[in-house]
Amino acid sequence: MTPGTGSTAAMPYYIALHVRPYPDTCFEYFAGMRHFDGAAAAKVCRNPRLLLRMVPLVRQLLHARATATTAAAHTTAAVNISTTTATTTTSTTSSTTAAAATASPPVPAALFVMSHPRVREVLRRELRRLWAAAESEAAAAAGGGGGRGGGLPPPPLPALFFLDSSYLPEGQLRNHVATNSLLSMVEQEVCRMAGAFVGTKASSISVLVAQERVAAAADYAAAEAGKEGNGAGVLIREAAAVEAGGWAGWNGTGGGGGGGGVTILL
């Protein structure tokens, strides 16, 4: 969403996270944290490795999207070439197809983070730190011959976006006693519309967003001719299955509000 306009015309593909350190003792730890200490977090958090698990999942989501987009570009280019230049030689077709596919990389993704205002700067810092660590590990693996196949480079850290009260209409809403609750409602809608959503299963808000994404997919499917509204466009997955590489059924390009995408609860 373009700040200050309310327009979604230029809205890019994005992944949404809901980070809710749980329970409240864990939230307070995150709110005052300067450097993450796994041992200290384990004493007060139900899921102390929440961010440590989210970052690899986001990287997998981006890699899956890049792979699917590249494959689709190859297929589209091959079809276009075969239908418009039937006399082209095989070698020319192959080189042109590859050039066409590589000329259209995926549009850079964005990463939207729904969180309480008190922990946002901590999350921004931690996400950047963990991403840098993951990049270092990927570079080391690639140097040792353990990099991923397919020739695609590791995904860069997407632009991070948060919402604050300045996005609410001017006037009483920005200074209302329920400002944080109103802001949360807007954030939930942004998460519902995301291409992929990674939430906190201990949070009722994350569960609600997941349910709404399934309902939206069902409505979308029901509106399509010859399709039943069974919610098949959105897959709610347990994190363990996804972390093990369970991406079957997801093409990496869908959006939660239009019948595609994936939802993961940690």
Image (spheres, grey):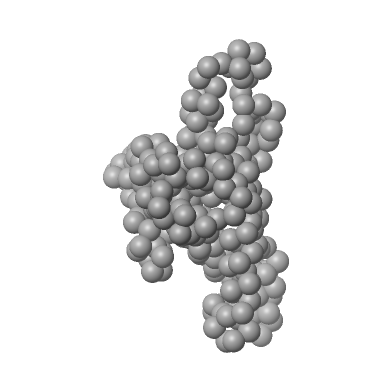
Splitting the image into 4 quarters, where does residue 154 fall?
bottom right
- The front one of 56 and 149 is 56
Q: Is residue 191 left or right of residue 95?
A: left
Q: Position of residue 148 (x, y in %)?
A: 54, 77
Splitting the image into 4 quarters, where does residue 31 fall?
top right
Q: Is residue 3 left or right of residue 52?
A: right
* Residue displayed at 61% across by 79% down: 140
Q: Position of residue 117 (x, y in %)?
A: 57, 35
Q: Is residue 207 left or right of residue 193?
A: left
Q: Position of residue 130 (x, y in %)?
A: 58, 61
Seen in the picture, residue 101 relative to 229 is either above or below; the reply is below
- The front one of 123 and 228 is 123
Furthest toward the top, the residue is 172
Counting the numbered discs, the total is 0
Seen in the picture, residue 185 relative to 114 is either above or below; the reply is above
Q: Position of residue 102 (x, y in %)?
A: 67, 70
* Residue displayed at 57% across by 87% down: 145
